[in-house]
Amino acid sequence: MLNSKGFTLIELLVALALMVILTGALYGTYFSVTAARERGGARIEARRELSSTLGRLHNEIASAYFPAMGANTASKAIFKVEDRDVFGKPASLIAFTFFAPPRVDTAPGSGLTLVSYFVREKDGVLTLVRESRDPYFDTTVKSYPYPVIDQVESFLVECYDGGKWVKTWDSAPGFNPGIPNAVRITVTTKGGGTFTTIASPGMKRGAP
């Protein structure tokens, strides 16, 4: 009897089919793990971005400046909150002056910064943006808003007047006197998470 060595064509086809199946399973697992890692990294980055922005906004509000009544009617210091919405969702605007850290350049400065946070909509996507400038020395320089939190669901600013929370505030003469007792910021992210910070502005003194 002859001793037959090697594989038959059927055995080769079966082995090839098994190799294709195993390779497909390995590739599927690899891409699933990679996609999950990327989603996890995106969530961590979004959380870091949110935490950083809320922390910065909290500190800026805590350093908010507004002159005492009658101190200087020519002051450009403001504190303003507008109740806005986009697609029926809160999209507040907040603008105020605060004591800024010292500048590292030699350009003249007042020591104050006029900053505003508002929601910008594009193609159905809401983005929280920030814009700032020196209210006294940068009046001829165009400032450019830049995104600080991508893809928010809502941005709500509320002011406490000592008796209740309100969604609008205006420090201009004839409206709210000075700055609110506290400011509550609520941000809802695209994933549905809601984050809140409450800051108490305390700088109310004579203007420089």
Image: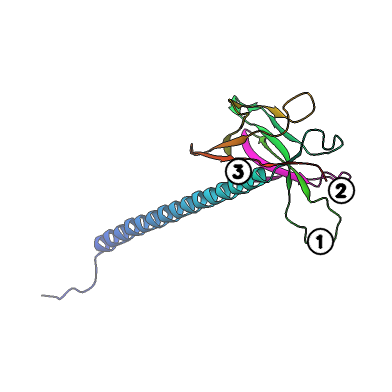
In the rendered structure, find residue 67 and report the number of the disc placed on it: none
Q: Residue at x 68, y 46 (%)?
A: 63
Asked whether residue 140 is in view, the answer is: yes
Mark 3 or mark 2, which is nearer to you?
Answer: 2
Secondary-structure class at tag 3: loop
Q: Residue at x 86, y 57 (%)?
A: 107
In the image, residue 119 sits, relative to residue 174, either above or below, namely: below
Q: Cα distance, mark 1 to mark 3? A: 30 Å
Q: Which residue is mark 1?
A: 105
Q: Residue at x 82, y 39 (%)?
A: 76
Image coords of residue 205 (percent x, y): 75, 41
Label 2 or label 1, whichever comes before in sequence order? 1
Label 1 or label 3, whichever comes before in sequence order? 1
Comparing 30 with 186, the one in front is: 186
Q: Mark 3 is on which residue type?
A: Asp
Secondary-structure class at tag 2: loop
Q: Cα distance, mark 3 to mark 2? A: 30 Å
Image coords of residue 117 (percent x, y): 68, 39
In the rendered structure, find residue 137 and report the number of the disc placed on it: 2
Q: Cα distance, mark 2 to mark 1? A: 14 Å
Q: Mark 2 is on which residue type?
A: Phe
Comparing 147 with 158, the one in front is: 158
- Magenta range is 124-149
Mark 1 or mark 3, which is nearer to you?
Answer: 1
Secondary-structure class at tag 1: loop
In the image, residue 85 sits, relative to residue 54, either above or below, namely: above
In the rendered structure, find residue 150 and report the number of the disc placed on it: 3
> Which image quadrant is residue 66 in?
top right
Give the crowd class for mark 2: few <14, some 14-19, many >=20 residues within 10 Å: few
Q: Mark 1 is on which residue type?
A: Asp
Q: Residue at x 49, y 54 (%)?
A: 41
Image coords of residue 179 (percent x, y): 70, 34
